[in-house]
Image (cartoon, rainbow, N blue to C red):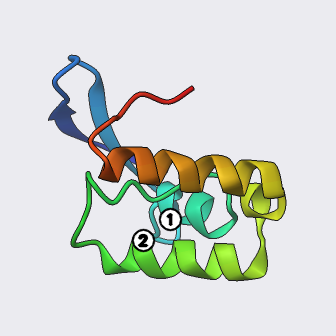
Amino acid sequence: VTVETLGQNKYKRTIDDILLSDGTYAYWELVVQGWRWWYQEYAPEDLILATLEAAARTSKNGLWGDPALALYRRGHIERREEGNSRTP
């Protein structure tokens, strides 16, 4: 794998991209398998992540296969859209 450091976020956490040996991003693989969500507010133009998450949802991969977690994610998105970023 290759780690590319992109900088830090507002909380001084390091932001990295992790490339796998085949050239794909580790994050993509986690999203398509349903173990990570696409945070649209941080990457609104990323059509690849949008497509991968849609495929994971449709296939009910990973977290999307658990109805309680899928509902949690939907509620999280709705709270963000309403301007309340706090999650329970």
Which amino acid is tagged 2?
A: Leu
Q: Residue at x 83, y 56 (%)?
A: 66
Q: In the rendering, which numbered label is found on residue 28? A: 1
Q: Residue at x 26, y 41 (%)?
A: 83
Q: In the rendering, which numbered label is found on residue 49? A: 2
Q: Residue at x 16, y 34 (%)?
A: 7
Q: Position of residue 40 (x, y in %)?
A: 33, 60
Tell me if label 2 and label 1 are in contact, CB under 8 Å: yes
Q: Residue furthest front?
A: 82
> How busy is the neighbourhood of tag 1: few (under 14 within 10 Å), some, or many (20 plus)?
some
Is disc 1 placed on a helix, strand or loop? helix
> How busy is the neighbourhood of tag 2: few (under 14 within 10 Å), some, or many (20 plus)?
many
Left or right of residue 60, residue 84 in this image:
left
Q: Quadrant of the C terminus?
A: top right
Is disc 2 placed on a helix, strand or loop? helix
Which amino acid is tagged 1?
A: Trp
